[in-house]
């Protein structure tokens, strides 16, 4: 019920203010009908003045929340008249409702002025009608004012604390949403990178095998059959990797899908053999042992070599050759992939040409390689071979993993 009343007050504050004010106006007028004489030092105060003071004590309550000090000033003026005249109306107690709102809504230093204002009528009444001692007339009222002010401060502190908690909860929700968006964007990037590496490489190999098979079909049917067999093997491998990747994305994916092995350095030989089968002569040289290289770094090395050879297949031209050098040392792993390709220009939308270097530098492949390298604080260099008519060089260095398991 309390929550409903507060909700109604937030939606229609004027309605609640009118109801509360009407209640106090009614109570003040009932007392003004004759009950005030039971406690008044002077019962000969005119009825019209009593009525006016009763209205002056109760009606300003309507503005207790929007203009509490103005409402209190009107009530204090009525209190001065009431105590000076000897009526000393009990309606003066309505001032404490306004004092509560002063403590609740205005700066705390305003409470001092409010207290001085409310004390003035008490002093006037004590001086005007000194029948009782000053401590019996003033001290109890000051204690009541202090308790009301403390109650307003307590409610105010509670409201401030609640608002701070709500704001903190809102900020945490915003941060949670931002973290979720960042995680989603990072996962999308990772998936796009994986799919580019898987699809791009395998399609390039299949294209090379198909071109070689069609060329050899007329002269050597056996070579064409070997090309078709290799195309089937590569296609099945691509489908298997895609299925593994897509299984991880399913909500109901089994745990085994997440434990499916990623390509490692031991798979480099098979990767190079597949590129050779597609028609690209590749020489490889390996120094050291990959035993100390973590799985994540092995995948990065594998994908960089894969992307470099795929670019040579796509852009290197029919006479291109490639060299892959992998070195494992104490300071980390180093990979260098070079080729002798001279890929011809490709038409651009404005009718001009663009060479193989432009394609390699601006495509998704190089971006993916740099992203993978940055994950392990490595360095990647990719560009045309210096002092050569053609060719391309990709150089990768991943420092040794210094994190302890």
Image (cartoon, rainbow, N blue to C red):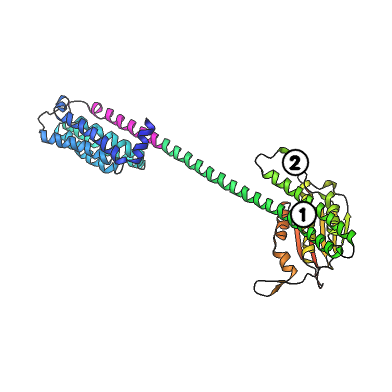
Q: Name the residue under label 2.
A: 259
Comes first in the chain, label 1 or label 2: 2
- Quadrant for the N terminus in the image: top left
Give the residue at x 11% y 33%. Answer: 47
Q: Which mark is residue 303?
A: 1
User: Is residue 129 at least partly visible in the picture?
Assistant: no
**From the viewer's perspective, is residue 65 above or below residue 370?**
above
Q: Say what secondary structure mark 2 lies in.
A: loop
**From the viewer's perspective, is residue 22 above or below residue 371?**
above
User: Is residue 59 at least partly visible in the picture?
Assistant: yes
- Res 120 → quadrant: top left
Give the residue at x 83% y 46%. Answer: 292
Residue segment shown in magenta: 130-157
* Residue 139 part of the magenta segment: yes
The reply, left or right, for residue 79 in relation to residue 228 is left
User: In this orientation, which residue lies closer to the viewer: 116 or 240?
Assistant: 240
User: In this orientation, which residue lies closer to the viewer: 370 or 184?
Assistant: 184
Give the residue at x 48% y 39%. Answer: 165
* Residue 152 part of the magenta segment: yes
User: In this orientation, which residue lies closer to the viewer: 132 or 115?
Assistant: 115
The reply, left or right, for residue 250 in relation to residue 274 is left
Magenta part, dominant SS:
helix
Direction bottom: furthest residue: 352
């Amino acid at each position: 019920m309390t929550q409903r009343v507060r909700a109604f007050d937030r939606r229609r504050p004027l309605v609640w203010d009118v109801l509360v004010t009407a209640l106090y106006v009614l109570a003040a007028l009932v007392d003004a009908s004759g009950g005030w004489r039971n406690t008044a030092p002077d019962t000969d105060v005119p009825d019209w003045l009593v009525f006016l003071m009763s209205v002056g004590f109760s009606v300003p309550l309507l503005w207790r929340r929007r203009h509490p000090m103005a409402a209190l000033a009107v009530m204090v003026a009525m209190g001065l008249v009431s105590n000076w005249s000897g009526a000393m109306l009990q309606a003066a107690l309505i001032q404490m409702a306004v004092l509560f709102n002063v403590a609740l809504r205005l700066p705390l230093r305003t409470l001092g002025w409010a207290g001085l204002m409310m004390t003035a009528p008490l002093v006037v009444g004590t001086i005007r009608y000194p029948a009782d001692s000053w401590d019996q007339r003033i001290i109890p009222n000051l204690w009541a004012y202090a308790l009301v002010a403390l109650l307003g401060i307590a409610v105010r502190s509670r409201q401030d604390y609640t608002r701070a908690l709500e704001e903190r909860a809102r900020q945490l929700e915003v941060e949670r949403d931002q973290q979720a968006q960042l995680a989603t964007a990072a996962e999308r990037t990772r998936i796009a990178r994986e799919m580019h590496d898987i699809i791009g490489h395998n399609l390039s190999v299949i294209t090379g095998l198909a071109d070689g098979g069609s060329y050899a079909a007329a002269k050597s049917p056996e070579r064409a059959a070997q090309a078709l067999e290799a195309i089937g093997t590569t296609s099945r491998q691509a489908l298997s990797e895609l299925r593994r990747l897509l299984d991880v994305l399913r909500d109901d994916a089994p745990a085994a899908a997440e434990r499916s092995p990623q390509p490692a350095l031991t798979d480099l030989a098979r990767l190079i053999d597949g590129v050779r089968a597609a028609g690209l002569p590749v020489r490889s040289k390996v120094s050291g042992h990959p035993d100390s290289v973590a799985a994540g770094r092995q995948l990065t090395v594998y994908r960089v070599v894969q992307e470099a050879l795929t670019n040579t297949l796509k852009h290197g031209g029919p006479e291109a050759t490639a060299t892959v050098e992998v070195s494992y040392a104490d300071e980390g792993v180093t990979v260098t992939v070079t080729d002798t390709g001279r890929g011809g220009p490709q038409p651009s939308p404005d009718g001009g040409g663009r060479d193989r270097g432009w394609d390699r530098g601006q495509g998704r492949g190089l971006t993916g390689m740099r992203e993978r390298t940055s994950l392990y604080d490595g360095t990647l260099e990719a560009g045309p071979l210096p002092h050569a008519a053609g060719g391309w060089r990709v150089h990768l260095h991943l420092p040794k993993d210094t994190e302890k398991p």
